[in-house]
Amino acid sequence: MKTGLSRRDFLKASAAASALILADRFSPWAVRRTARAQSQLRFWIGLGATQGDAIVEFVRRATEGTDVSVSVDNFGDDAETKFTAGFGAGDVPNMFETDYPYMGGYVLGLDAFEPLDDILAAVDYPTDSILPVLLDRCRFNGALYAVPHGWNSWVMFYNLDHFEEAGLPTDRDPENLEEFVDWAKRLTKKDNSGRIIRSGFLNTIAQGILPLNIWGVMLHQYGGSIVTEDGRKTNFNNEAGRKAADFVMKTFYEWEVSDPTVSQRYDYWLTGNASMFYTGTWVVSSSLDQQNLNFRTALYPKLGDKMAVQYEYSGLVIPRGSSDEAKLAAARIYKYFAENAGEFGVLSSQLPVTEEGLAYEAYAKSDTHKYFAPSEQGGEFAFWDVAHPQSADFSQYTGNGLLKRILDRVWARQMSIDDALNEADAELQAILDETPAVSLI
């Protein structure tokens, strides 16, 4: 489903962990046990190191000293493709971690996940402690199909050494579009042939997920959206969509502040070749631990008519087909994530999913927290991907979705902005005419 480099192959992580306790429950989730029986569970994830390693560690902790063995496979960017193929062949794991843009397709299109309300109640999962805005995104047609393990609002990373070198302020954000462009130009460096060797603002055609996300945040800042609030109409083939696309094009061809040929955006940032970089908080730990960069983070600045940032999370689900015993086992592991959300935030470079987690002392005092903090306040300005059976086509964070495939031709100057928006509008509106979107903020 996804192609190209994304956060899921930022750094690879795979490991195995073991065990879990099961408790006898009453109807409808009664579990029959034999003495010291061992259950074998499979857990598929697709996350980079800070998040993926944290999940593996938490599974180990949640199941330590018990009678259930859990094998964790990290498929990186191929996790969704692997799951879709496995579902079609009747071979799926007992536990699965997936991004929000794909949930609508799995639930509404494939009916691939178990509804969780009764299962979670049977293990006393602390549903009431989860931040409501996150839990609401896990519901489809009134039923709960996922629980979040972490979330973030994308932030802007600023390389402070570059700012000091250029004589720019290091303690505030650009106040408007004009100042942003001025800063980006002053931060950009070129060689004698005019080739960009340091991007004042990191954007790249070679990895089309990034310009699509930049187009998305600017679309919302200019007052547009992918679809209307009722889920029945597109809302980007308009002035907001055109201005957002024009912004992306100017970073490459008019302002010349972005190298369009960058093939590895994370490496480019981590090696000090970018001054401003719009991405998620998962980059914080590597920036500190691997490269020791001098940087700060802040919400994406108001460059359009209003504030907007990208806000996302990944959910933990239970695929259909497991035994009742395995479903309860998975739910108990997920419960451990919720009850220790603050510690998971420390390990994962994500934000805790509970108020208690956000207030957890070790999280609040962690070295990384000051870089995560802007993201904590980002929900006020956030926008979400569209929940739909064909969610990937509407997503602003999908490697091969319809939006990306069409807009990539704009960035490469193979298609005009108007033609691309017209084409995307026609194709996505046809999908909405058949099946409206169901859950929007």
Image (tube, rainbow, N blue to C red):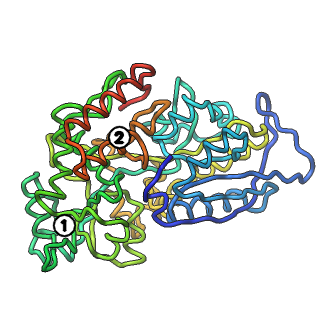
Q: Does residue 375 appear anywhere in the picture?
A: no
Amino acid carrying label 1: it is Gly
Q: Earlier in the sequence, mark 2 or mark 1?
A: 1
Residue drawn 21% across the image and 63% down it? 258
Disc ID at residue 200: 1
The answer to whether 400 is drawn above or below residue 429 in the figure is below
2 vs 1, front mark: 2
Residue 212 location in percent, x, y? 31, 48
Numbered disc 1: secondary structure: loop
Residue 17 location in percent, x, y? 70, 62
Picture quarter containing residue 187?
bottom left
Residue drawn 35% across the image and 50% down it? 153
Q: Provide the residue designation for mark 2.
A: 403
The answer to whether 390 is drawn above or below residue 286 in the figure is above
- Decide if residue 330 is on the left or right side of residue 386: right
Residue drawn 92% across the image and 46% down it? 34
- In space, the residues marked 2 and 1 are separated at their CA atoms by 26 Å
Disc ID at residue 220: none
Residue drawn 35% across the image and 78% down it? 292
Q: Residue 30 or 203: which is nearer the viewer? A: 203
Picture quarter containing residue 428?
top left
Picture quarter containing residue 4?
bottom left
